[in-house]
Structure formats: C-alpha cells, structure tokens
Image (spheres, helix red, strand yellow):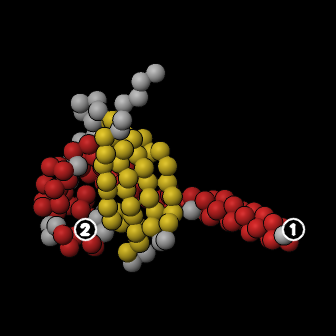
Amino acid sequence: MHLKKTILTIITFLSISGLAKSEISYEKEFDETQFIIESQIQAFLDENAELAYSYAAPLIKMKFNNPLEFMSMVKNYYEPVYNPKQFYFIDARYFEGAIYHQLQVISQQDESFLATYSLIQDEGKWKISGCAVYPMQKQSI
C-alpha cells in the first residue's frame, strides 16, 4: 500500500512539473497567437476584409469562400469581436496541437462578453480556427 502511494505521489509530481514546464515552453506561441488575434480584430475595425480573412484557418476559408463573405458573417454573428470597444486577454492554453485564448470583450454598448479563440498551425503559421462568444454573467456584490 505504501509503495502504491509513493508511486502515485511521484506520478502526480511529475505530471504537475510537466504541466508547469509545458506552460513555460508555450509562451512564445501564446505571444504569437495573441498578436494574430489582435491583428485580426484591428483588421475588422479597419474594415480590411482581405487582411482579416488572411488570419483564418483553411477550415474557415472552406466555409466562407471569400473575404467579403467572411467579413459579413463576423459582422452579423460575432459583433462583439467585429467592433469591440475594448478587449483584454484573460488566459491562454495549449491542448492537443491547438492554442486557446480567452478574452473579455466590451462591446460598443458596454456589454461584457467572453470570447474563446482556437488557433492551429497551417504550414508553420498559426491561423484562427474558431471563435465562440458568450455574454458574461453580471455579478452582484
């Protein structure tokens, strides 16, 4: 029984150490992917459909055949990230080859949203493969 506990403790420690190490090793990728998200949001604000579309992963481009279709979809269904008043990066995680960023987005109407972006590598470059936007719950004190 004691051996089993010792082995479990060692495995837990190694797992935690591995997680901490992997978090550090992805800082460069987190910075790169954060820049890509910021750049796409700026392209939306500048109404630069070509540039915004260039950050999309191939799966997204297959659904929206050209930059104008893509821009229209984002404007109609993802307005908080299309035209934010402000946004803040909250967290970033690496999981099974993808990077996920969470952002708090403040809309032009001062409503708060949680946006989760996923990014994958395509030919050595990070591309945005998805975005989910949800209203944040208001909390009372």
Q: Is mark 2 on a helix, strand or loop?
A: helix
Q: Which residue is tagged 2?
A: 60
Mark 1 or 2, which is nearer the eye? Answer: 1
**Residue for point 87% across, 68% down:** 2
**Residue for point 14% across, 49% down:** 76
Q: State the residue lying farthest toward the right.
A: 2
- 46 lies above or below 131: above
Q: What element carries label 1?
A: helix
Q: Position of residue 119 (x, y in %)?
A: 39, 64
Q: What residue type is labelled 1?
A: His
Q: Confirm or deny contact between disc 1 and disc 2 (CB under 8 A).
A: no
Q: Which residue is tagged 1?
A: 2
**Residue for point 37% across, 75% down:** 122
**Residue for point 31% across, 45% down:** 134
Instruction: Looking at the picture, tell me which residue is in the foreground, 70 or 36.
Output: 70
Alpha-carbon distance for marks 1 and 2?
Answer: 53 Å
Disc 2 crowd rating (10 Å Cα; few below 14, some 14-19, many 20+) is: some
Q: Which of marks 1 and 2 is nearer the N terminus?
A: 1
- 60 lies above or below 52: below
Say if residue 42 shows up in the picture.
Answer: no
Q: Where is residue 22 in the image (x, y as percent from the top left)?
A: 62, 64
Say if residue 56 shows up in the picture.
Answer: yes
**Left or right of 43 on screen, residue 67:** left
